[in-house]
Amino acid sequence: MRRVLVLGGTGWLGRAIVRGLLADGADVTCLARGESGSIPEGARLVQVDRRAPGAYDQVRGSWDEVIELAFEPVLVEPAVEVLGDDAAHWTLVSSVSVYDRNDQPDADESASLVEPLDVSQYPDAKVAAERATAARLGSRLMIVRPGLIVGPGDLSDRFGYWPARLSRTGPVLVPTSAERFVQVIDVADLADWIARVGREGHTGVVNAVGTVMPIDDFFRAVVGVTGYEGEFIAVEDDALLAEEVRYWAGPRSLPLWLPLPDSAFAQRSGLAFLKAGGQVRPMRDTLIDVLADERSRGIDRPRRSGLTATEEASIIASVR
């Protein structure tokens, strides 16, 4: 039986990966503090703070696969130092945020990266983690760079904002659509693929991204699953910024909205992912699952990302 160590496994993506590993017949051990949640039944948890001395003592030895979900160098570097020599295969989950340019549509894994000058910044830390891991593991390493991960259970509220919002009535504030795109990867598709890459012997670097979709097509897809019959109010960037609406995520934001110079962030090449056996489910299927999750958690609940009903109505009244 394939022995797999997951460094993490209690967060959203980690639990999904562990479920995929268990379904694939692996013997799974998770090393984590255990503060983000529980691990799936059938896996074993070694509960430890990875910053503590001797954090990896209980998991030393040979592993068929190690999957690293952290990105802080203070966590990544000691792990690969202690465990790297005895791991037959290592998968590091990174991010497409490592690239230094977002204005090149269809850019692949060869695109240039940010220089990790400040590892307190997410992209810099991811690049530093990649380099430290690659230096130790060489050809035994798979670096996975996911795009925006979406699906049921996503606590960021970015993607889910739209099916939730179009489940309500009233005019919907949206950014203008020209040259704007949406590109996401369903958490189940990503996790199932990561669970297989070690067994299948994949190495190298792969952008784990979904299909590039014009944002108008995305909104039509959301309408298709929600049945929304109201009006869309499309507003230019300058007007939205004047109303202090944020890009991408966070409070008082229009989630998934990107500045036009950064629109290629949602247009990464996914060819290597598909060639390595990755699968991308139809957007409609993901939206159906996310809408069900949004309804179960409450369409009108406080959100980490998006506009409140009051904020949206006030902005629409101001820009009309």
Image (spheres, grey):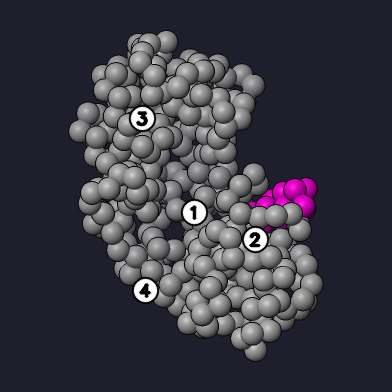
Q: Are marks 1 and 4 in contact (CB under 8 Å)?
A: no
Residue corresponding to mark 1: 148
In the image, is residue 290 part of the stretch drawn in magenta? yes
Task: Identify residue type, mark 1.
Answer: Leu
Residue 239: x, y in percent? 52, 83
> Is residue 135 rendered to the left or right of residue 164?
left
Q: Are marks 4 and 2 in contact (CB under 8 Å)?
A: no
Q: Which mark is residue 16?
A: none
Q: Marks 1 and 4, Cα distance to the nearest angstrom?
A: 18 Å
Q: Secondary structure at mark 4?
A: helix
**Crowding at label 3, few (<14), some or many (≥20) Cα neighbours within 10 Å?**
some
Residue indicated by mark 4: 261
Span of residues in magenta: 282-298
Residue 75, numbered circle: 3
Tally of numbered tags: 4
User: Mark 4 and mark 2: span between their CA atoms?
Assistant: 23 Å
The image shows residue 251 at horizontal and vertical percentages of 58, 60
**How many angstroms separate mark 4 from mark 3 (CA)?**
33 Å
Q: In this view of the protein, can residue 195 be seen by the observer?
A: yes
**In the rendered structure, which disc, 1 or 2, sits on the residue that comes first in sequence?**
1
Quadrant of the image occupied by residue 317:
bottom right
**Left or right of 75 in this view: 138:** left
Q: Amino acid at mark 4?
A: Pro
For the C terminus, the quadrant is bottom right
Closer to the chain start, of discs 4 and 2, is 2
Which-is-in-front pick, marks 4 and 3? 3
Q: Marks 1 and 3, Cα distance to the nearest angstrom?
A: 23 Å
On the image, the x and y values in percent for residue 107 come to: 32, 62
* Residue 27 position in % (x across, y down): 51, 17
